[in-house]
Image: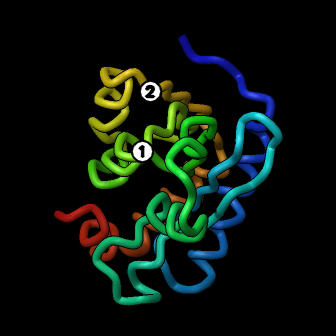
C-alpha cells in the first residue's frame, strides 16, 4: 500500500529542480533528492551527470547518493529517495543496497523500469506520483536527443 509522505511535495519539487538543472547543463533531465523522513532534512540532491562528467554511472539517483557523502548505514533506513523517473536496474540496486525503504517516482510513462516491481518484491515502498512536469521534460529530451537517451539507458 502506498502512502503519502509528509515531505513528498518538497522532495518532488527538489528532484524536478535538479532535473531542469541537468538539462540546462546539457545533460539528461533526471533529478533526485534524499530526505530524512523524521525531520525533513534534505541529506543530498543531484541530477544525472553522465554527459557533463563523461561518466558511465552518474544517473540522477546515484548522483544524489554521491552528494549525500558518507552516511552511517542506519541513516538510510529512515529516508525517502525522490526521483523524477522510474529507477533503472543500477539505481534500484543502490536503493536496495542502502536499505532506503521508500522511493517516490515522478513518472514512469516515458520509461518504466522493472526495478519498481523488484523494489516492491524486496519490501520497499514505491510511490508513482505521475508528475506532469517530469513527464514533459523527459518527453521533450527523448524526442530531441533520442541517441543520448538510448545511451543513458544502455540501449
**100 lies left or right of 132:** left
**40 lies left or right of 49:** right
* Crowdedness near tag 2: few (<14), some (14–19) or many (≥20) residues, C-alpha within 10 Å: some
Q: Is residue 51 visible?
A: yes
Image mark for residue 51? none
Image location of residue 154, percent across then percent down: 20, 64
Badge 1 marks a residue whose secondary structure is helix
Q: Which image quadrant for residue 149?
A: bottom left
Q: Nearer the viewer, residue 39 or 140?
A: 39
Residue contact between numbered discs 2 and 1, judged by CB atoms under 8 Å: yes
Tell me which residue sits at (58%, 17%) in the image: 2
Q: What distance separates the C-alpha of mark 2 from that of mark 1?
A: 9 Å
Note whether 84 is above or below 9 in the view shown: below
Note whether 149 is above or below 81 in the view shown: below
Q: Nearer the viewer, residue 34 or 127?
A: 34
Badge 2 marks a residue whose secondary structure is loop
Tell me which residue sits at (53%, 37%) in the image: 103
Tell me which residue sits at (71%, 43%) in the image: 36
Tell me which residue sits at (40%, 72%) in the image: 58
User: Which residue matches tag 1?
Assistant: 95
Image location of residue 77, percent across then percent down: 55, 36
Q: Which image quadrant for residue 81?
A: top right
* Crowdedness near tag 1: few (<14), some (14–19) or many (≥20) residues, C-alpha within 10 Å: many
**57 lies left or right of 48:** left
Image location of residue 74, percent across then percent down: 55, 42
Q: Is residue 140 visible?
A: no
The C terminus lies in which quarter of the figure? bottom left
User: Which residue matches tag 2?
Assistant: 124
Amino acid at each position: 500500500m502506498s502512502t503519502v509522505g509528509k515531505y513528498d511535495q518538497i522532495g518532488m519539487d527538489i528532484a524536478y529542480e535538479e532535473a531542469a538543472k541537468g538539462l540546462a547543463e546539457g545533460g539528461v533531465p533526471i533529478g533526485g533528492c534524499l530526505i530524512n523522513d523524521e525531520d525533513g532534512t534534505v541529506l543530498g540532491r543531484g541530477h544525472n551527470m553522465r554527459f557533463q562528467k563523461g561518466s558511465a554511472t552518474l544517473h540522477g539517483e546515484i548522483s544524489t547518493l554521491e552528494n549525500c557523502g558518507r552516511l552511517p548505514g542506519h541513516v538510510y533506513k529512515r529516508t525517502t529517495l525522490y526521483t523524477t523517473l522510474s529507477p533503472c536496474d543500477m539505481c534500484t540496486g543502490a536503493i536496495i543496497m542502502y536499505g532506503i525503504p521508500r522511493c517516490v517516482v515522478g513518472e514512469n510513462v516515458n520509461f518504466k523500469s522493472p526495478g519498481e516491481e523488484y523494489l516492491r518484491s524486496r519490501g520497499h515502498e514505491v510511490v508513482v506520483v505521475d508528475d506532469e512536469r517530469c513527464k514533459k521534460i523527459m518527453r521533450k529530451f527523448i524526442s530531441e536527443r533520442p541517441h543520448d537517451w538510448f545511451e543513458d539507458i544502455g540501449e
